[in-house]
Image: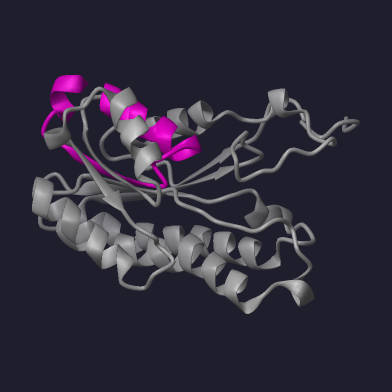
């Protein structure tokens, strides 16, 4: 598997920590060169260090995906360095603490929509254009959230963005498969990352781990030729909400 992937390139957003870092490390172990994108140089440098990849096989791109021009800059940087993109992992996400809709600021609303939906759409559009030119096609994996289905109070805009990402993935699958591009979405339940603040009602040891999501990503990438796991739903085996049955 490592030899098969040695000439393949994966772009991972939100690669500095949590799910993004776990995915990046699994991709590195499988032989991929990496384009690592996030807002923190320190965190990205640590991901690169943990991956064991040399700079020529691990490009660091500091980027804020809330900015409209960022997707084009990121894809351009990856292509300038590697000349190809074989895997795109749209993992970067952002949400403020749970806030009632009427108290959600316009700035927070716009950032949630930009990072969680607009940027993945733009990155997918640009990466797919490149993948369609490659004989080997490519794989695009979007990381959504159970919030898209659970519809919890205080997460209205975030839920809408993630639900949009799920619908977008299904539409892309229908459109892009003719070009040899597999498009999938992972819908994880509660994952123990910094995005979820500590809460006395949560037993964090029962939550999904970033490595669980990374394993799901690799199962999509390594799926048999001619098959596409279009939607993968991950839930903790035991409910991490204290007192839940």
Q: Residue at x 31, y 61 (%)?
A: 123
Q: Position of residue 3 (x, y in %)?
A: 14, 21
Q: Give the quadrant of the N terminus.
A: top left
Instruction: State left or right for residue 189 relative to residue 115.
Output: right
- As displayed, is residue 196 above or below residue 52? below
Q: Residue at x 47, y 62 (%)?
A: 115
Name which quarter of the figure residue 215 lies in: top left
Name which quarter of the figure residue 131 lies in: bottom left
- As displayed, is residue 94 above or below residue 111? above
Q: Give the quadrant of the C terminus.
A: top right
Name which quarter of the figure residue 20 lies in: top left
| Outermost residue to the front | 42
Q: Nearer the viewer, residue 75 or 231?
A: 75
Instruction: State left or right for residue 242 relative to residue 237.
Output: right
Residue 61 is one of the magenta-drawn residues: no
Q: Position of residue 221 (x, y in %)?
A: 32, 35
Q: Residue at x 79, y 61 (%)?
A: 153
Q: Position of residue 33 (x, y in %)?
A: 19, 35
**Magenta region, residue range:** 1-29
């Amino acid at each position: 598997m490592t030899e098969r992937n040695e000439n393949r390139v994966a772009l991972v957003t939100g690669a500095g920590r949590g799910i993004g870092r776990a995915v990046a490390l699994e991709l590195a172990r499988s032989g991929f060169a990496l384009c690592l994108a996030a807002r923190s140089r320190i965190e990205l440098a640590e991901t690169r260090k943990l991956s064991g990849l040399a700079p020529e096989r691990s490009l660091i791109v500091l980027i804020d995906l809330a900015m409209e021009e960022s997707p084009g800059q990121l894809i351009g940087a990856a292509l300038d360095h590697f000349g190809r993109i074989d895997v795109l992992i749209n993992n970067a996400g952002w949400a403020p603490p749970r806030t009632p809709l009427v108290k959600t600021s316009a700035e927070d609303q716009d950032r949630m929509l930009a990072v969680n939906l607009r940027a993945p759409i733009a990155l997918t559009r640009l990466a797919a254009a490149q993948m369609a030119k490659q004989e080997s096609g490519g794989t695009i994996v979007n990381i959504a959230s159970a919030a898209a289905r659970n519809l919890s109070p205080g997460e209205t805009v975030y839920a809408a963005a993630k639900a949009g990402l799920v619908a977008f993935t299904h539409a892309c699958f229908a459109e892009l498969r003719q070009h040899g591009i597999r498009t999938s979405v992972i819908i994880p339940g509660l994952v123990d990352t910094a995005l979820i603040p500590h809460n006395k009602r949560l037993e964090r040891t029962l939550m999904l781990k970033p490595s669980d999501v990374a394993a799901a990503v690799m199962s999509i990438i390594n799926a048999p030729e001619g098959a596409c796991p279009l939607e993968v739903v991950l839930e903790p085996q035991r409910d991490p909400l204290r007192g839940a049955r």
